[in-house]
Image: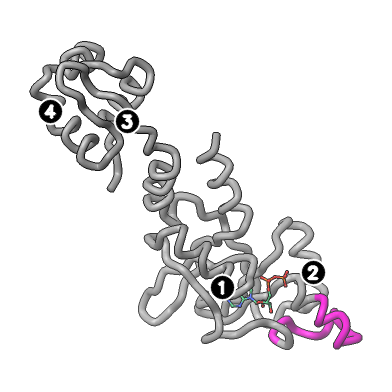
């Protein structure tokens, strides 16, 4: 359940001034008591507010955790995704390392000639590459990348919470955000631990 803007306003008025009557809340919002009735009913039924006869509405204190949960359950991948950094499978390990430094990212996504996702390259993959192959300037990233179909992906409309769980379960740093079009897997973004940490800080602030 998501609180609408008016319900959020009511909640903050009751938090500041409660116990407060419905008419006084309505006056503060320059609305009629009747207009507010459905919102007050929702806030009361879902446990944010309690009402005492002749005293008015007061705040139950249910808020913090539940409101944060409500907010988290409304954040979608598309709201926080960042830009993906793409390379082709014939890029050398050396060039991929340079790209990672220049773009300041920890993961590169590998696409084929049709711009469809075929692999993922992480820092550890590249470290492994430098230890296994002497000539990193002439060894392609395809030698060390994680390949389809073993790639964990997500979609713009997925819940961020679902992606965060995948990152933990699969012990990875990021997921490509993809859109499937005519059998092609187009990479349109990425969700990283940094995106998720930013959301966490924003919620707390
Ligand atoms: P790092 O290697 O920098 O610690 P990760 O933990 O993300 O970064 O990568 C660990 C391994 O998981 C690497 O082999 C990488 O190719 C692979 N990997 C990374 N992201 C994904 C993903 N979305 N799906 C499947 N495998 C991935």
Quarter of the figure that contains the C terminus: top right
For the residues marked 1 and 4, what is the alpha-carbon distance in whole angstroms?
Answer: 44 Å
| Mark pair 1, 3: CA separation | 34 Å
Find disc 2 in the rendering and name its residue: 97
State which quadrant residue 58 falls in: top left
Distance from disc 4 to disc 2, alpha carbons, whole Å, reads 60 Å
Q: Work out whether 51 lies above or below 4.
A: above
Who comes first in sequence, dot 1 or dot 2?
2
| Residue at figure coordinates x 16%, y 14% from the top left | 23
How many neighbours does mark 1 have within 10 angstroms: few (below 14), some (14-19), or many (20 or more)? few
Q: Nearer the viewer, mark 4 or mark 2?
A: 4
Whether tag 4 and tag 2 are in contact, CB under 8 A, the answer is no
Task: Assess whether mark 3 and mark 2 are in contact (beta carbons under 8 angstroms).
Answer: no
Tell which residue pokes out farthest to the right in this image.
134
Q: Residue at x 13, y 33 (%)?
A: 38
Horizontal placement of 66 versus 106: left or right?
left
Mark 3 falls on what kind of element? helix
**Disc 2 element:** helix
Find the residue positioned furthest to the left: 34
Distance of label 1 from label 2 (alpha carbons):
27 Å
Q: Is residue 134 magenta?
A: yes
Q: Position of residue 169 (x, y in %)?
A: 56, 73
The residue carrying mark 1 is 169
The tag on residue 37 is 4
The kind of secondary structure element at disc 4 is: helix
Q: Residues within 10 Å of mark 3 (few under 14, many from 20)?
A: few
Quickly name the residue at label 3: 8
SS class, disc 1: helix
User: Is residue 84 inside the magenta stretch?
Assistant: no
Whether disc 2's CB lies below 8 Å from ligand 1 is answered no
Magenta residues span: 127-142
């Amino acid at each position: 359940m998501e609180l609408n803007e008016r319900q959020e306003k009511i909640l903050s008025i009751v938090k500041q001034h409660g116990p407060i009557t419905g008419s006084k809340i309505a006056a503060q919002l320059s609305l009629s008591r009747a207009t507010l009735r459905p919102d007050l009913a929702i806030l009361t039924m879902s446990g944010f507010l309690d009402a005492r006869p002749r005293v008015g509405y007061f705040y139950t204190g249910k808020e913090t955790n539940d409101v944060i949960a409500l907010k988290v359950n409304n954040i979608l991948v598309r709201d926080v995704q960042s830009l993906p950094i793409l390379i082709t499978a014939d890029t050398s390990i050396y060039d991929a390392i340079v790209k990672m430094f220049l773009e300041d990212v920890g993961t590169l996504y590998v696409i084929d000639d049709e711009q469809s996702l075929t692999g993922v390259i992480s820092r550890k993959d590249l470290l492994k590459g430098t230890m296994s192959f002497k000539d990193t300037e002439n060894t392609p990233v395809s030698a060390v990348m994680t390949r389809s179909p073993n790639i964990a992906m997500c979609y713009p409309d997925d819940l961020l919470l679902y992606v965060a769980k995948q990152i933990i379960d699969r012990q990875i740093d990021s997921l490509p955000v993809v859109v499937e079009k005519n059998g092609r897997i187009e990479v349109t973004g990425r969700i990283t631990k940094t995106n998720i940490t930013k959301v966490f800080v924003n919620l707390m602030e």
